[in-house]
Amino acid sequence: MKILSVNAGSSSLKFKLYEMPEEKGLISGVFEKIGLEDSFYTIKYENEKIKKEVPLKDHEVAFKILIDELVENGVIDSLDDIKGIGHRIVQGGSYFDQSVLVDDSVISKIDELSLLAPLHNPAAIVGIRAAQSVIKNAKHVTVFDTAFHQTMPEENYLYALPYELYEEYGIRRYGAHGTSHKYVSLKMNEILGRYNTKLITCHIGNGASISAIIDGKCVNTSMGLTPNAGLIMGTRCGDIDASIIPYIMEKKKLTPKDVDKLINKESGLYGISGVSSDSRDIEEGIHKGNERCALAQKMFVKRIVDYIAKYYVEMQGCDAIVFTAGIGENSTSTRREILDSLKVLGIEIDDEKNNTRGEEICITKSSSKIPVYVIPTDEELMIARDTYNIIER
Ligand code: ADP
């Protein structure tokens, strides 16, 4: 059965087509600058990558071109071969603790939650509507970034603000990257050969979050109401003293929009280093003796260590730690710096094994009290899996 996994942004559409249940990726690609002047798409198929510059008026046009490409490349015979489409949704609030079949009430809830994810939820609805109008006979499923974190206990998801804010506006921790944390934790349990485990999963990319997972259920996560909580990220500050916000607004005469930009786009690695939000540039800066890059990296690593230590204590132990996403999968130096700070937990890194990028591997010595793994994440596959399971059910 062919299942399409899609991730619609306001001007982009990423896709990957799978043969399920074999979980075989057939073709993938991305449409970019939809609705803008210089729109184009790239497709990866059988180790070849093609790029075409075409006008993409809207997401519906992108879906039509996508279907044409699938037929032309012989991946499908006709539209009807695609039985299911899984849509990635950033914010599912308290409504969704698992993936669901799309109907009008699901769409209206996603719409209602747009207040919490103004850049993402409206774009995802545009994507669903466009897919529904082009691929009419397929079943549509929504997969939520927040769903995996819905098992957190109240004391971990509530903020110590007036309780009415939670009741009236749903102000609480929802987390994000749930699909990734779920994927790597499932993989980790498979590797350990058991499911009664305590795991700490570190999704460290441009956006970054850490989760504490007991017996496959998330008990805590570092992102909050929005992704700007917890770790220091490429351009996000993560945890800060909340009173800094009104203070700088007053001092610098900033509007809510201005301050939102400052903490989401101008902070983090970029804000501290003044050089870049990209960890490769930070590493290069450190190499060249740039002290602000070194400081940014030190702060970045320290925050990750703080969260691992916090979750270790919270879960009263840990059976394995997992690194994933761009930095987690590729930055050998960041992983080493983190694990060197965790020696007190009996973690012993194996430098030779750690000297690998983007592949599944245990990077600690056999004598290490806690094994640490690199597991490349695969959110698209997780979306396809959920979609397939719901359709089969
Ligand atoms: P997101 O999906 O949140 O945009 P990614 O998971 O793609 O982010 O991660 C992007 C980050 O991964 C960037 O900071 C980038 O520098 C880092 N990264 C990718 N490859 C490497 C590498 N080989 N070495 C160090 N960092 C890397």
Image (spheres, rainbow, N blue to C red):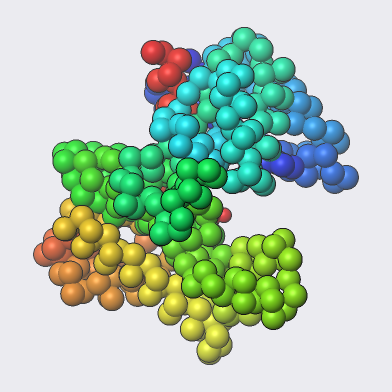
At x 27%, y 60%, the residue is 311
Quadrant of the rendered image containing residue 67: top right
Nearer to the camera, 310 or 225: 225
Quadrant of the rendered image containing residue 355: bottom left
Q: Is residue 200 visible?
A: yes
In the rendered structure, the answer to whether residue 74 lies left or right of residue 153 reads: right
In the rendered structure, the answer to whether residue 38 lies left or right of residue 361 reads: right
Nearer to the camera, 230 or 271: 230
At x 43%, y 79%, the residue is 298
- Residue 171, position in %: x, y? 50, 49
- Residue 152, position in %: x, y? 33, 45
- Residue 377, position in %: x, y? 42, 46
Tally the numbered discs: 0
- Residue 35, position in %: x, y? 83, 39
Q: Is residue 376 visible?
A: no
> Above or below — where is 216 with respect to 259?
above
In the rendered structure, the answer to whether residue 282 lies left or right of residue 185 reads: right
> Above or below — where is 309 with respect to 177?
below
At x 38%, y 50%, the residue is 157
Assign the C terminus to one quadrant of the image. Answer: top left
